[in-house]
Image (spheres, grey):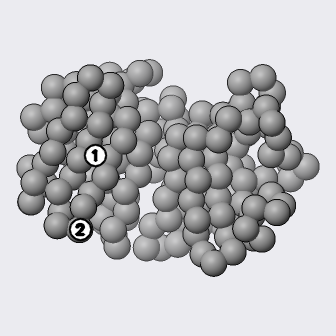
């Protein structure tokens, strides 16, 4: 349904500038079924709905295959390669709150709100395979991750922060 509109009822949780003019946003509707993923081709002057109405979207990213990745509470990591005509589940059973992409490598920060397996998850191959890289993090309700240029991965959870140094262990 492309008639859905981005409205004041939508709570935007993620924004992703994708090119000079293109912006993606993702959000959650608490009072109406109007949130989801939206795309603007004119720097936010107008918005087109591209999918996932009713999902609790928390993070966005674009991988090296030019696929839009969407991290959600309750639904894991999803992707589309056709601007939302079809959606595939990449990693189910996770609360994905943060996505960091570098070439073919993807790092996810996952909470443990609706699933017991929060933490940091890593894919070296654009999401074809995954490994848990939570290591020594005791509070695996990860809210945000960030990777520095010198390959340190910072994670933020509700009660603690952790730094993983090169080679991210």
Residue 113 visible somewhere in the drawing? yes
Where does residue 152 sit, x and y in percent of width and height? Answer: 17, 57
Residue that label 2 marks: 149
- Give the secondary structure at mark 1: strand
Residue occupying the point 86% across, 45% down: 4
- In the rendering, which numbered label is found on residue 121? 1
Q: Position of residue 71 (x, y in %)?
A: 49, 44
Above or below 20: residue 84: above
C-alpha separation, residue under disc 1 versus residue under disc 2: 19 Å
Q: Quadrant of residue 34?
A: top right
Residue 136 location in percent, x, y?
10, 34
Q: Is residue 128 above or below residue 117?
A: below
Residue at 80% of width from left, 36% of height from top?
Answer: 8
Label 2: how many Cα within 10 Å (few below 14, some 14–19, many 20+): few
Q: Which class describes the residues within 10 Å of circle 1: few (<14), some (14-19), or many (20+)?
A: some
Q: Residue furthest bottom?
A: 20
Asked if 49 appears above or below 158 in the picture, the reply is below
155 or 63, which is in the foreground?
155
Could you tell me which residue is drawn at 31 percent across and 52 percent down?
A: 146
Label of residue 35 in the image:
none
């Amino acid at each position: 349904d492309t008639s859905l509109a981005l409205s004041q009822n939508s709570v935007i949780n993620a924004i992703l500038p994708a090119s000079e003019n293109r912006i993606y946003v993702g959000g959650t509707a608490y009072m109406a079924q109007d949130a989801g993923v939206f795309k603007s081709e004119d720097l936010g002057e107008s918005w087109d709905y591209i999918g996932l109405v009713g999902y609790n979207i928390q993070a966005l990213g674009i991988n090296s295959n030019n696929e839009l990745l969407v991290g959600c509470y309750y639904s894991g990591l999803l992707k589309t390669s056709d601007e939302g005509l079809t959606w595939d589940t990449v990693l189910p059973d996770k609360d994905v709150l943060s996505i960091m992409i570098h070439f073919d490598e993807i790092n996810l920060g996952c909470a443990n709100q609706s699933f017991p397996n929060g933490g940091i998850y890593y894919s070296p191959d654009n999401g074809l395979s995954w490994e848990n890289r939570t290591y020594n993090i005791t509070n695996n309700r990860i809210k945000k991750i960030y990777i520095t240029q010198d390959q340190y991965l910072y994670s933020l959870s509700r009660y603690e922060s952790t730094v993983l140094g090169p080679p991210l262990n």
